[in-house]
Image (cartoon, helix red, strand yellow):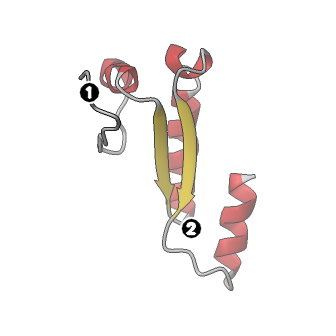
Amino acid sequence: MEGIDWLVLDSPAGTQGKELAHTLKLANKVIIPVQPSVFDMVATRDFINQLVEERRIQRKKSFIGIVGMRVNPRTRVASTLEQFLL
């Protein structure tokens, strides 16, 4: 992929194992969208736990960013999401 400055790979939720490792080989940065729902936060936490076990993340060759989606900052659930992200 010489000559490409950036490339976006959209992978399905629940990507794991060899597929996750292969995808991470192509990525410098991993952006994880999370919605302010208990179900999404639990799934995101589980996914992050899988990511930190990957060598590429441990060796700091790929970095993780988390983006809150569909968040109204004036709601209680926004506060819950903020606490989750800290």
Residue at image position (32%, 17%) is 18
Q: How many marks?
A: 2
Tell me if residue 41 comes above or below residue 23 in the rendering: below
Residue at image position (75%, 60%) is 83
Report which quarter residue 3 is drawn in: top left
Residue at image mark 1: 3
What distance separates the C-alpha of mark 2 from that of mark 1?
A: 38 Å
Report which quarter residue 11 is drawn in: top left
Residue 32 circle label:
none
Element type at marker 1? loop
Residue 62 in percent (x, y) is at 52, 27
Q: Earlier in the sequence, mark 2 or mark 1?
A: 1
Residue 79 in percent (x, y) is at 73, 71
Which amino acid type is marked by label 2?
A: Pro
Tell me if residue 6 comes above or below residue 85 in the rendering: above
Which amino acid type is marked by label 1?
A: Gly
Residue at image position (30%, 38%) is 7
Judge from the rendering whether residue 43 lies leftward or rightward of residue 73; answer left or right.
left
Residue 53 in percent (x, y) is at 56, 20
Element type at marker 2? loop
